[in-house]
Image: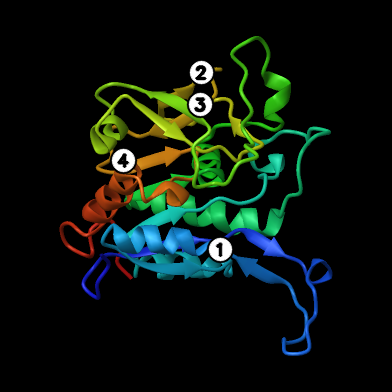
Amino acid sequence: MGSLNGPLIGVTTSEVRRAETLSQIPESEPLMHEMALGLTYMRAVEAGGGMPVVIPPLELDLVEPLLDRLDGICLSGGPDIDPVAYGEEPDAQLGPTEPDLDRFELAIASAADRRGLPMLAICRGTQALNVVRGGTLIQHLPDHQEGPDAIPHRQPNPGREPSHPVTIEPGSLLAKTIGGDRVDVNSFHHQAIDRLGGDLVVTARAVDGTIEAVEDPSRPFLIGVQWHAELLAARPEEQALFSAFASVAGSGDRAAGKTTM
């Protein structure tokens, strides 16, 4: 479990609840825009041995001072990424986006990547990692699926239940971490990786060919998974992801990968 001596893991948050979509109750504060982050991210990081802290969107000049205090970054899930971030026009089926939040999350992902900080990216976080590495996204995944192998990537059943298997590249860090070359995962994504970002390799695919995981083999720990591993953390193979992440983040000198101020 997490402890006061565990590595400090920053968990990004990119989900916005707008005041007009919230219900006022007599006991509540005045309605306002809110940031949302599932507690399951924090619980999974803690159970893996890390000390999680929520990272809200901040001014960009605070990114580097913030990273000076962190040992690792978990890029969480959230809404579609605005395609302006990778130089494309919006698809007609693009979901709601939050460009201001994109700018902060992409900035912190890019800065953490340059520093070599251990990173675990989840769902949208994997897409953000691909974008900061110069890759692009499929904006509306159903338009790119055809044939008998096509599977739904937004499951109707609860997130703690897997909906399809993925095949994992043997010998990859992901395979070594979870201890196998196949795992059943959940699926809640509208977008997916298209052109792969620099120095990333594909380490898992769904049966329909959709990229389900990537990593950088040159890094001690830089893994992105398209599924919501935090919701499946009760399963040993998924919790192993968070444990390995925290272990690498907590190893060595705390200043490793940090800039000198």
Q: Look at the numbered discs 1 and 2 and tell me whether their residues touch, using CB distance below 8 Å.
A: no
Q: Nearer the viewer, mark 1 or mark 4?
A: 4
What separation in Å lies between label 3 and label 4 (alpha carbons)? 19 Å
Quarter of the picture containing the C terminus is: bottom left
Q: Secondary structure at mark 3?
A: strand
What separation in Å lies between label 2 and label 4 (alpha carbons)? 20 Å
In this figure, which residue is indicated by the disc labeled 4?
A: 237
Residue name at image x 56 percent, y 37 percent = 187
How crowded pointer 3 is (Cα within 10 Å; few <14, some 14-19, many 20+) is rated as some
In this figure, which residue is indicated by the disc labeled 1?
A: 37
Under mark 2, the amino acid is Val
- Residue 21: percent from the left, percent from the top? 81, 66
Name the image quarter holding residue 11. bottom left
Quarter of the picture containing the N terminus is: bottom left
Q: Secondary structure at mark 1?
A: loop
Indicate which disc residue 207 carries.
Answer: 2
Q: Look at the numbered discs 1 and 4 and tell me whether their residues touch, using CB distance below 8 Å.
A: no
